[in-house]
Image: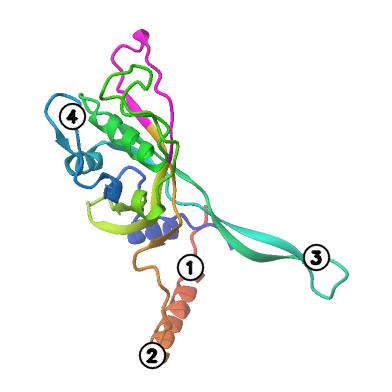
C-alpha cells in the first residue's frame, strides 16, 4: 500500500500530538520533613513552601521506564527456548532543578537525603561546638522518608492530558555541582536521582466493550478501509 501524505496529515491534525516541554511536577515532602524549616538566611523558610516552589523550578524529569525480566524456558523440556516473563523492574529516574537564590532548595534535598541515612551531622563534626552533631550512620524507616511524586502532562492548549504517579519515591543521589568562574553566570542546577516502588498512569485501565460498541467500531473500520481505496501516492 503506497504512502498517503494526505492521510498522514489528517491523522496528525485530528489526533494531535504531545510535546515534552509542557509538564508540572508535584512533590509532597515526606514525613521526616513535616513541621520543619530551613534557616539558611536567618529567617526560617517552611519546608512546605520550598516544596511548592519546586513545581516552578523543575527543568526536566525522566518518566518511569519498565523492563520485563525474562527467563529462558524450554516449552517441552528440550529444543528451542523461548522468553518467559518472570518479573518487572522499574528503572530509577532523575530530575533537574534550578536552584533558588538563597540555596534553600539545595538544603531541602540535602536534608531529605540526610534524613534517609544520616551520613553527616548538623555541622562540622570536628568543630567541637555545642551545635555540632556527630552522624549516627543509621537508616530511617521507608514510610518516613518516601512520598508520592506526580508528573502532570499538558497538551499544546494547556489542558491536562496525563498524570503519572510515582509511589514510595525517594532521592537516592545528588550529583556534585560544578562551580566555575568561567561559566559567566549560568544557572545553578541540581541533579537528583530517584527510586520508587511502582508507578501508575491515571485513567489507563482498559475496559471491555459492549456488543453495540464493538459493532460501531467494526463499522468505522470498514468505512476507513473503503476510504483508503482512493489513496493519493507521491
Q: Label 2 near label 4: C-beta < 8 Å?
A: no
Q: Which residue reaches farthest top?
A: 181
Give the alpha-carbon distance from disc 4 to disc 1, as whole Å: 70 Å
For the record, the magenta segment spans 172-190
Residue 131 visible: yes
Circle 1 is placed at which residue position? Answer: 230
Give the alpha-carbon distance from disc 1 to disc 3, as whole Å: 45 Å
Give the alpha-carbon distance from disc 4 to disc 2, as whole Å: 63 Å
Give the alpha-carbon distance from disc 1 to disc 2, as whole Å: 29 Å
Q: Label 3 near label 1: C-beta < 8 Å?
A: no
Q: Which mark is residue 212?
A: 2
- In what element is the residue under mark 3? strand
Circle 4 is placed at which residue position? Answer: 39
Label whose residue precedes the other's in the sequence (4 or 2): 4
Of tags 4 and 1, which is closer to the observer?
A: 4
Label 3 crowd bin: few (<14), some (14–19), many (20+), radius 10 Å? few
Q: Label 3 near label 2: C-beta < 8 Å?
A: no
Amino acid at each position: 500500500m503506497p504512502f498517503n501524505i494526505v492521510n498522514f496529515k489528517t491523522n496528525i491534525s485530528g489526533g494531535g500530538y504531545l510535546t515534552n516541554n509542557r509538564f508540572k511536577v508535584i512533590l509532597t515532602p515526606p514525613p521526616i520533613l513535616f513541621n520543619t524549616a530551613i534557616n539558611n538566611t536567618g529567617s526560617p523558610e517552611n519546608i512546605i513552601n520550598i516544596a511548592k516552589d519546586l513545581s516552578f523550578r523543575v527543568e526536566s524529569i525522566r518518566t518511569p521506564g519498565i523492563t520485563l525480566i525474562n527467563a529462558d524456558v524450554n516449552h517441552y523440556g528440550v529444543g528451542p527456548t523461548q522468553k518467559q516473563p518472570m518479573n518487572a523492574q522499574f528503572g530509577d529516574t532523575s530530575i533537574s532543578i534550578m536552584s533558588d537564590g538563597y540555596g534553600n532548595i539545595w538544603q531541602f534535598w540535602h536534608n531529605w537525603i540526610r534524613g534517609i541515612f544520616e551520613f553527616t551531622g548538623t555541622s562540622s563534626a570536628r568543630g567541637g561546638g555545642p551545635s555540632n552533631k556527630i552522624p549516627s550512620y543509621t537508616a530511617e524507616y521507608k514510610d518516613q522518608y518516601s512520598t508520592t511524586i506526580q508528573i502532570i502532562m499538558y497538551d499544546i492548549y494547556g489542558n491536562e492530558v496525563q498524570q503519572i504517579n510515582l509511589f514510595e519515591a525517594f532521592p537516592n543521589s545528588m550529583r556534585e555541582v560544578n562551580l566555575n568562574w568561567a561559566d559567566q553566570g549560568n544557572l545553578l542546577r541540581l541533579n537528583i536521582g530517584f527510586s520508587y516502588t511502582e508507578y501508575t498512569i491515571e485513567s489507563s485501565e482498559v475496559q471491555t466493550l459492549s456488543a453495540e460498541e464493538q459493532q460501531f467500531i467494526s463499522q468505522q473500520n470498514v468505512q476507513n478501509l473503503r476510504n483508503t481505496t482512493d489513496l493519493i501516492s507521491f
